[in-house]
Each structure stands twice: as structure tokens, then as C-alpha cells.
Amino acid sequence: MVMKNHSGGGGDDWIPEALQML
């Protein structure tokens, strides 16, 4: 997922963000 970069670069930060988008 390229959106992981949008979180700031944490790595596991993109996981919760993807759930919110759903």
C-alpha cells in the first residue's frame, strides 16, 4: 500500500489508517 507513506513513515501506522478508509 502506497498510503503507508502518507502516515509519516512509521510502518505500522498505515494499518489503522487503511481500516479507517474502509
Image (tube, helix red, strand yellow):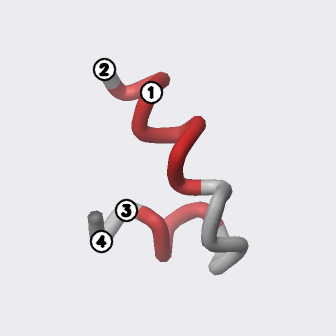
**Hey, what amino acid is under mark 1?**
Leu
**Element type at marker 4?**
loop
Residue 9 % position (x, y): 64, 79
Q: Distance between the Cα atoms at labels 1 and 4?
A: 14 Å
Residue 17 % position (x, y): 53, 40
Q: Distance between the Cα atoms at labels 2 and 1?
A: 5 Å
Q: Which residue is mark 2?
A: 22
**Hey, what amino acid is under mark 2?**
Leu
Residue 8's image quarter? bottom right
Mark 3 and mark 2 residues within 8 Å of each other at the beta carbon: no
Q: Give the number of the disc on residue 2.
A: 4
Q: Distance between the Cα atoms at labels 3 and 2?
A: 13 Å
**Hey, what amino acid is under mark 3?**
Met
Mark nearest the camera among 1 and 3 is 1
Mark 3 and mark 4 residues within 8 Å of each other at the beta carbon: yes
Q: Which residue is mark 3?
A: 3
Q: Earlier in the sequence, mark 3 or mark 2?
A: 3
**Hey, what amino acid is under mark 4?**
Val
Residue 20 % position (x, y): 48, 23
Mark 2 and mark 1 residues within 8 Å of each other at the beta carbon: yes
